[in-house]
Image (cartoon, rainbow, N blue to C red):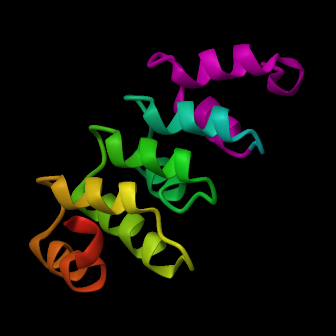
Amino acid sequence: MDLKNMSQVDRRALAGNPNTSGDILRELAKGDDWGVRSYVARNTNIPLGLLTMLAQDEDSSVRWEVACNLRASGKILVTLLEYEKRLKDPHSYIICYLYSKPRLPYIAKVIIETLFGEILS
């Protein structure tokens, strides 16, 4: 499949399709279109390793989709939190959403309370 010659709309549709193979999702995630990467991150059939990789994406929309993905384990959510902590300006909506996730380990919630307590109020 020639992904490079597909339109942006077609790549996004392919990225969001739960029947798309993990190999194709990996190829789509390598692109520089944050919209396509967002669709990959929201795909319910995404390989967990790829979801972990996208938890460290430079685009906050992609990371938001990782946080919202039902397949995101506590470990993946912690990876996302670690990335947000390293940012000069972490995204408050991602931090608050992570804090609300039942799968986020307790210690990670304590870290959020300690470092980002002001944005939780």
User: Which residue appears at 72% of the width and 15% of the height?
Assistant: 9
Give the main secondary structure of the magenta stretch: helix
Q: How many marks?
A: 0
Measured from the top left, where is residue 106 in percent x and y?
A: 10, 72
Residue 15: in magenta span? yes
Q: Is residue 83 left or right of residue 102?
A: right
Quadrant, the C terminus: bottom left
Residue 20 position, x and y percent, is 54, 20
Q: Is residue 21 magenta?
A: yes
User: Is 95 in front, or is 37?
Assistant: 95
Residue farthest to the bottom, as pictured:
114
Q: Quadrant of residue 75?
A: bottom left
Q: Residue at x 34, y 39 (%)?
A: 69
Report the quarter where the N terminus lies: top right
Q: Who is closer to the viewer here, 90 or 103?
A: 90
Tell me which segment is drawn in magenta.
1-30
- Examine the rendered structure and indicate whether residue 62 appears above or below residue 77: above
State left or right for residue 6 relative to residue 82: right
Q: Nearer the viewer, residue 24 or 90?
A: 90
Left or right side of 62 for 69 = left
- Seen in the picture, residue 21 relative to 52 is either above or below; the reply is above
